[in-house]
Amino acid sequence: MTIVLEDYRSSPGLDEELAALGYAAVQGWPDQRPVTPAMVRSLLRPGGMTATTLAMHRDRNGRLLGAAALRWPATVTASGRLWGPIVHPTAQRAGLGRSLLDTLVGVVGSHPGVRFTTTDIPESRVAGWELFEQLGWRKDKPSALLARGLPADLPVRTLVPVRPVRPGEYVDAALSELFTLDRPHLCASTARDTFARWSADARYTADGLLLAGEVDKLSGAALVYVSRHESDDEPAEALLSDVLVDSRLDPTDAAEVRTALVTSALRMANGTNAAVARAFVDNLELRDTLQSMGFVEVDRIRHYIST
């Protein structure tokens, strides 16, 4: 079984192939969603100066049947991200996923000290997470996939004003500080690059970056990405990608900020004609807020860390 390793370089043809493979692999599972070339570009774009390592397997006719990738960390203190392995349904249960992962584990082994975390793996996809446990990867903090249909009925106003970022507005420092307050356990470079990471995503639009408060005193921020699939049968998705709240707020004020951000995110999603809103959540307070606003838990999500 031939696995080809190469540096990922975005191109329309390759991104479309990888998106089609990813979409075929999630169809029928709880995490079925629009997997688009823009999503592929965003997941595989380099996190720093090192190109993402892409592993692929094609059949004798050149058809892409499996892929996986290592997105290298930007700094020595950060973790990289493993995407996949993704295997086309027609090629599953033949050892291809294991071969792809073994190949990339060998690459990781030649870079001692570099850690990688997996992308989201639904608990219902047992074959996906069992592979990592068999190879000794360590289980990380779990999360949940929540979803609700759109449009959403929303209050006219919330207690906390929320607005989209203004054109040309400098928010890098404010978002960096907010990220540090909300997630002090993550490395400083991740916090510093918050706006750069968010805005570099191919799905980013300014109206999807929502701010609670003014830049000199942000109490919260939320990020929404909208994806539309080439197939009309797949509903357009509004992904609530991130929600940050100032941890210095008392619980009541923090809850009001969180509710206002989610309300504004759903209002933004209503305006895009998306049919479903989704969120991958590891924060209990955010999960409770989403569920109070009509989201339901679709599946539990597992993550693993390389050893």
Image (cartoon, rainbow, N blue to C red):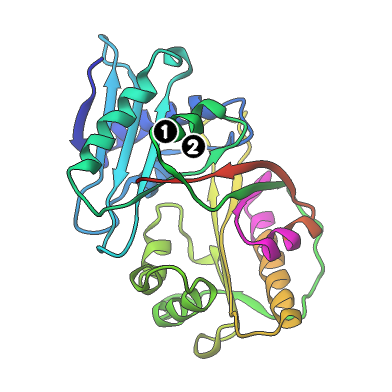
Disc on the earlier residue, 1 or 2: 1
Residue at the image point whose x is 46% and y is 58% from the top? 204
- Residue 65 lies, in percent from the top left, at 36, 19
Quarter residue 237 falls in: top right
Residue at the image point whose x is 41% and y is 29% from the top? 86
Q: Visible in this render: residue 9?
A: no
Please say if 228 is above or below 255.
Answer: above
Front one among 199 and 76: 76
Residue 224 placement, left or right of 268: left
Please say if 22 is above or below 155.
Answer: above
Q: Are marks 1 and 2 in contact (CB under 8 Å)?
A: yes
Front one among 272 and 152: 152
Residue at the image point whose x is 36% and y is 59% from the top? 200
- Residue 232 lies, in percent from the top left, at 60, 30
In space, the residues marked 1 and 2 are separated at their CA atoms by: 5 Å
Residue carrying label 2: 35
Residue 135 placement, left or right of 59: right
Magenta span:
268-289
Residue carrying label 1: 19
Identify the amino acid type marked 2.
Val
Quarter residue 288 falls in: bottom right
Residue 139 placement, left or right of 6: right
Please say if 121 is above or below 17.
Answer: below
173 part of magenta stretch:
no
